[in-house]
Every structure is written in C-alpha cells, then in structure tokens.
Image (cartoon, coloured by chain):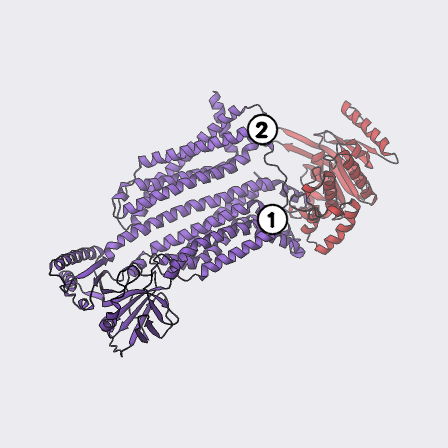
Amino acid sequence: MSILEVQGLKKTYTTRLGGSRVEALKNVTFRVEEGEYVAIMGESGSGKTTLLNILAALDKPTGGVVKLDGREMGAIREAELAAFRREHLGFVFQDFNLLDTFSLEDNIFLPLVLAGERPEEMERRLRPIAKKLGIGEILKKYPYEVSGGQKQRAAVARALIIGPRLILADEPTGALDSRATDELLRLFGEINQGGQTILMVTHSVRAASHAGRVLFIRDGEVFHQLYRGAGSEMEQYQRITDTLTMLTTGGERR
Amino acid sequence: MKGGFYRRIAWSGMRKNGRLYVPFLLTCMGMVGMFYIVSFLCYSPMLGGMAGGTVMQMLLELGQWVIAAFAVLFLFYSHSFLLRRRKKEFGLYNILGMGKGNLALVLLWESVLTGLLALAGGLAGGIALAKFAELGMVFLLQARADYALSISVEAVWQTVRLFGVIFLLLFLDTIRQVRLANPMELLHSEAAGERPPRANWLLAVLGALILGAAYWLAVSVKEPLKAFLWFFVAVLLVIVATYLLFMAGSVVVCRLLQKRKRYYYQTRHFVSVSSMAYRMKRNGAGLASICILCTMVLVMLMSTVCLYVGTEDSLRTRYPRHLNLGVKVEEPGQLGRMERERALFEEALAARGLAAENVLDFRCASFEAFVDAASGEVMLDESEMHAFDLGTLADMWECCLVPVEDYNAMTGRNVILEPGEALLCTARTGYAGDQVSLSSGQSWRIRERVEDFEINGGDGALLTPSMYLFIGDFEEAVEPLLGLESGNGRPLVSLKWVYGMDVEAPEEEQARMAGEIRDGLARLKEEAEGEADGAGTRTRGWTFESVAEERLGFYSLYGGLFFLGVLLGIVFLFAAVLIMYYKQICEGYEDQARFGILQKVGMTRKEIRDSVNSQVLTVFFLPLLAAGVHLAFAFPMTRKLLALFNLGNTGLMIRVAVGCYLAFALFYVVVYRFTSRAYYGIVSGDH
C-alpha cells in the first residue's frame, strides 16, 4: 500500500473581492510508496509550495483527495490536525525554521515536548540521531552560533526524532552553500537507505538528482516523471536537465 | 495637487498602522485633555475666588508642570515605538525613489495631522470634563458652585502652545532619525540576531539582598521622624533592587526552571519559559520602571486619599477640642487666676444658649526630656539641644506635670495621692518602668496608668511621644525645675494653662464664637500690659485655635493634594499600561515568525494561545504584583510619615491602600485583555 496517495488534487485561490480566480493546482495525481525518495520539481508559480502546504495539512484543497497511510486527511478534524502533523510528518524547510530562543537540542525536542514525551525518553531518542547527523557536539549551542549547514542538520534531526511516516522537505538546500548541500543530500540518501520515506520539493537539479524519482509540475499538473533506476547521479542529472529544457521550450509530451 | 499627494500618503500611512497609531493618538489626546483640565483649574476664577482656592491653585500649578514634563518624556517614548515599527516603510519609500526631502514632507503631514487630531480630540474631551473637575474641586473644598459650562481661553492657548512645541520636537526627532539612516538600514532595522540571555547570578543575588535590606528597613523603623530620614534610603534601595531583580533575577529564574527538566519539558512551560528569558532580557529594565512607577502611584494615591479622607481625624488630633486655648505664664501661682479668660468663653456660650462639652481644663508644667522608657530615667535636657538631629529626637519626649486635682475635676474621679506617687498617661509610645525619676532628683512611683485623659494637641501632637504625670504636690514639685535652662538659654519648663471645649453649634457659629473670644483675649492682653508691672495676670502669651477656622485650611491643602494625587495617578497609570501595550505589540511582530514555526511543527492554535496568554500575563502582571509587595512593605513607613500630618488612623489607611490597589488592578486587567487580544491577532497573523 502507498504511504501517500494524491488524487485529482485541486486548489483555486480567489482574490478577496471574488474577482479573479487563480488555479494553483488543477489536477494533481501521484502516489508515494513506502521507502521512496521523491523529488518534485517545477518553476516558480508552478504550484509546488501549494502542493506541499496541502500535504502538510497547513492548507485545504478545493477538490481532490490526499490519503496518508490510507487515511483521508480532509476527514481529520481541525482539533486533531496539529497532533496528526506532529505524529506523522517531519518537516525540513529552506530557512530552517529553528526557534532562535531555543538551543539546538531544545529545538529538536520541540515536537516531542508537544507530544508530552518524558525527558529521559527524549534524550534516548536524540542520541543516535545526533550521532548520525554529526551534531552531537553542538547540541547546546544556539542557532545564531552555528553555520547554515549545521542548522539544517538540526532541523533534519527535529524532523526525524518523531519517527515520521513521511518527511516533507521544502527546498532544503536553498539556503546552503555547495559543501553543505552535498553533505545534506548525502544525509538524506543515508536516511532514505534506512527506510525513511522522503518527499522533497526543490528547484535544484543537483538535489533532485539524488532522489529515486522526480515529478515535474507545470501549470498545476504533474507533467512528467523520471525514475532514476540503477543509473548514477550524473546520468540522472543529465536527464533532469533535458526534461527541464524540454519543459521550458514547451514540449507537449506526457 | 502635490501637497494633496503627500497628505494622502501620510494619512494612509497612519490608517494602515492603526494598531500603533490609535493608541498613540489616544495617549496624545489624554495628555492634552489632562493638561487642559489642570490648566483650566489654575485659571478658574470661581476656584480662585473660593476660600482655600488659592492654595489649591498653587498646588495645581505645580502639578501642571509635572504633567507637562511627563508629557514630553512619555510622548517621546511612545513615539519611538511608533518610529521603530515604521522605519521599514520609510526605507521602502526611499528605495522607490522618494528623496529624504519628500519623506520629510510626508512626515510633516503626519505630524500636522497627529497634532491637529490630538489637540482637537484632547481639547474637546478636556473642555467637556473640565467642568466636572471644577465641580469636583469645589466639592472637595466643601463649597457650592454654579453649573455653567465655561471655556478658558488662556488654558486653551497654553495647551496649544505646549503641545505644539512637543509635536514640533517629535517631528524634528523623526527627521533626524530618518536622515541618519540609509535605505537598506531602514528596510532591515527590525531583523537582527540576538544572543541568548546570560544568567547573572551575582546581580540577582545582590538584588535579592538589597531588596531584603530595604524591606527590613521599611518595617523595622519605629519612630516617624526616623522614618522620614530612612524612607528615602529605603526607596533608593528598593529602586536599585527592583532593577537588579527584573533584569538579572528574572533570567536566573528562567534558567533555573530550564534546569528542572521535568518542569521545563512540558508543553505548557517549554515555549513560555525559554521565551520569557529573552523577553525579560529585553524588557527587564522597562518592566522594572513600570513597577516603580506603579509603586509610586500607589503610594501617592494611598497617601493623598488617606490625608483627604482622614482630614477630620487629623483635625481632631491636632485640635483636641472645637475651641482650644493655651496660656503661658511665668509663675505657678498665676495659673489659678484665669477668671477673665474663662469669662470670655462663658459669655460667648451664654449669648447663644450653649453649654460647654468635653471640657479640658488643667494647669501643667511641660518640658522636653530624653526618656529611657525601659528604666524610667528622665534626663532633663540641660545640654546642647540639636533640634534637627532626627535620630536623637526620637527619644525626646514631651513631659507634662499636671496637678491631680485638675485630673479629678475633668474626669469626675476622686484620686488622692500619697506624697511621691503619680498617675501616668502616655501617648504614642509605651512606658515600661514603674517609676519616673527626673535627673534633677525628683522621682515618683506610678500608682496607676490611666487612659481616660485625652492628650493635648499642638503642633507636635503626633510627632513626639508624650507623658503626662498627675501629681499631688504640683507647686512644690515645679518650683525646683523653674530655674533650669535648656541649651539655648531659654527656661526649660514652661507653665501653661490649657483650656478647651466642644460646642454643639454649626461650623459658622463656631467660627464666630472663636472670633469673639480671640478679640476678647487680645483686649485682655492689652489691659494686662497697661496694668502696673508685676500684676498677677501678666502672661508670656497665649495661643487660641478653633477647629472651625482651621478646617478650611486643612481641606484646601489635603483636598488639593488629593486631587493632584488622583490626577497624576491617572496620568501615570495611563503611561504605564500604554508602555506595556506598545511593548507587547512590538514583541508580537517579532514573535510572529516564531509562532508560525510552532504551528508548522505541530502546536495547536489553542496551545499557542495558552502560551501567549501565560507570557503576556507574566509580563503584564509581574510589575503589578511586585508593586503590590512593595506597597505592603512601604505601608508601615507610609503610616509613620502620615503621622507627621497628624493622621494616625491605621484601619482607614489599610482600607484605602487595598482600595487603591484594587482599582488600579481592575484598570490594568481591562487593558490586559485588549493587549493580549491584539497580541494574539498579530502572532497568529489574523490582522
């Protein structure tokens, strides 16, 4: 069974006075299987962020269905949504979204604290993750004291610590330099190898080339998809670039 | 056309920042209105024409300057909040191609609009309320007034002038700030990384110690005169300690809480505690200031309300009877011969068909002495006297020797004393010994302590402790004391005949009686001077006081203080809560991003709301709470200070203190509700 099932997803924004309507998502349908590493690519305005917000249950679709683990998200009551998000989804954002009033450790603990976990249990869970991500030494530091790459790794740790069914990453490499980007993508690869399902929205061909599958969105629809299969990252990189070129020059392949 | 453009931009800028501008405008209006009212009262011919009105107007003129000075400070302060929020907007205009000159024009329009609105609204409110204030004042002075509405042109002109200057200064300050900054700085003036607050244990502990010392000082001082001196020391210590505790102590507490993992890692505490550390680091000084401001307002309110409400008490303590006469003489033998003075009172009573009540009528020999209340030693003061050495003054007693016959006559008892025996009555301080011995050699065994004797008033009525000794052999006992001199060469002992009575007559009638008696006394004095030298009735002088005549003076002074106290209380209260409001709003914008993250990470809206509430609640009520504790500890000292104003009614003071605090808290709660709603609106992005 798929972890995530998106069917005929539609999102229409109406300007406040009801004048013009903008279709951010027309008809998006795809599935993500357990253990997959999927990247979603598209130009600015193609509806990527809207899609991610709906998957994160931060926004409601105008039409269509999103199922996580077979459970329809539209049917979850508002009051339970926050808890649902907390227990099933891990988030990694472009601008890290770490709270500057917390040390890295407390930032990572945040979802567990919200879930009412005991301090000992939180420590126990953190240790292996911190080791894997190489942030054991800087846990007591504050976000402003560490580099962008370190911040992003702390954010990944925060996403992982709840043991989510799905990690949603929004341009996770967007604010990182190339070394930190490589480092993060390597980590994502490792995490995925460990069985973690990841859905990543990105602009970056390099980031997307690490994923097992790339979905291309244009004008609110899934336009095309590419499986990496057994190919190397370099090959995948080339294929993504070709597809993007075709997309921008207006190809009509489906 | 071009002018219209700038005006429109200014106007829409103000409207879009309504959440910041409306409170600022209201503050301005409040200040303008308040100033106008006080100024109006200063010029009010009705008030000036009333008895006691001039004293009031003098006090008000003083208050007017306090309000003016405060308005300048406070408007600058709240305007700086406004400016900080709007710098980004100015930066944007700048980048979009508006020169600094154009920007200045927009700002000029904003200042003009703000000024006009504030003056119009404030004056309208002020004029509407000034009449009420005037009636209130008249009522305080216990007089009657007409109800015609009037506008004082002088007061309007003075208000316009003052606030015109203030708004001009605000405008110039804005220009200066905008000129100094470059566009990119203006755009980014809000975002800046911040270090986590460090817990400074040393300062926190120091603060706690100083506060403890100040509190100890406040409750341990016994004598009112000492209190006067130490009050300022204690106030200074409390101020220092409040700053230390709010700035360092609060962070230390947050850090301690964070160390307790079981407590810290709970949804309810996690976000609140760690944000509070930052909040306190940023706002500690501000909150401490507000706490001190609140305390001052409360103490001021309490004192002035007590003074006013307790006016009758003070009058009775200061003037023990409706009519009071004291005649000083040189020889004990003269004390008995006061028939002519007595006759004056009797004539005045008889002419109105009244009878004297609660008559005070006794001879006494009074002197000041150092009394060792434990051993019963009374050191007659023959050495150099330091009248202003407050520390020693506290052990200085007013001692009176009174013939026991006079005591018997007044109380209707029939006490017969053995030689060397005395009755003792003390006021203000207990006396432990069972005998009193003067350093000149005489001593009396105390046969009985009596309480049915009402102590004489006088200027020092409540200042110094006093002791009345009723003795059998008055003239014999007094004789050896007469030759003694105090340090400044004047006779130590003064012989006095004290006469006083209550009369059941209306105020005006009492005043007329007092006038007649005073005239009579003056006549007697002239006659006495005309008589041959050494004749029996020669006196050193007399003092005659009537409550009826003094009452108005008391009411105009205490009423004026009361009115000013309430007025300044309101002004400071407004200031305090507005500062809180602005602080919270500004923080709201800063916290917006933070709460966005929390929501993404999985905090429910309810949890966010709870966390917001607990933080705003703490920030808001911490100063009030601390002010309450300060007030409680200031109470004993305030009580002793009020004793200097002849007010000794503790029950009344407690009621007034509690009442003031509750009224204060109520207003506070209302503002808190508005603030937390506005704050939540901002952080949840609903605006």
> Which residue type does callout 1 highlight?
Ala
Q: Is residue B411 visible?
A: no
Residue A185 image offset from top left, x and y in percent: 79, 38
- Compare residues B149 and A138 and report the one nearer the observer: A138
Camera-side residue of B381 and B518 = B381
Q: Secondary structure at mark 2?
A: loop
Tag 1 and tag 2, C-beta contact below 8 Å: no
- Residue that appears at 36% across and 42% down: B64
Residue B228 visible somewhere in the drawing:
yes
Which colour is chain B painted?
purple
Furthest toward the bottom, the residue is B418
Judging from the image, mark 1 belongs to the subunit labelled B
Numbered circle sitting on residue B277: 1
Name the residue furthest top: B1
Assess disc 2: are there few (<14), some (14-19) or many (≥20) residues with their C-alpha within 10 Å of its C-alpha. few
Res B599 → quadrant: top right
Q: Chain of mark 2?
A: B
Picture coordinates of residue B18, whole percent (x, y): 50, 36
Percent of width and height locating residue B371: 36, 67
Quickly name the residue at label 2. Answer: B182
Chain with red colouring: A
Left or right: B146, with B304 as reference point:
left
- Label 1: how many Cα within 10 Å (few below 14, some 14–19, many 20+): many
A162 to B28, vertically: above or below: below
Q: Which image quadrant: the C terminus of chain B?
A: top right
Position above or below: B556 against A65: below
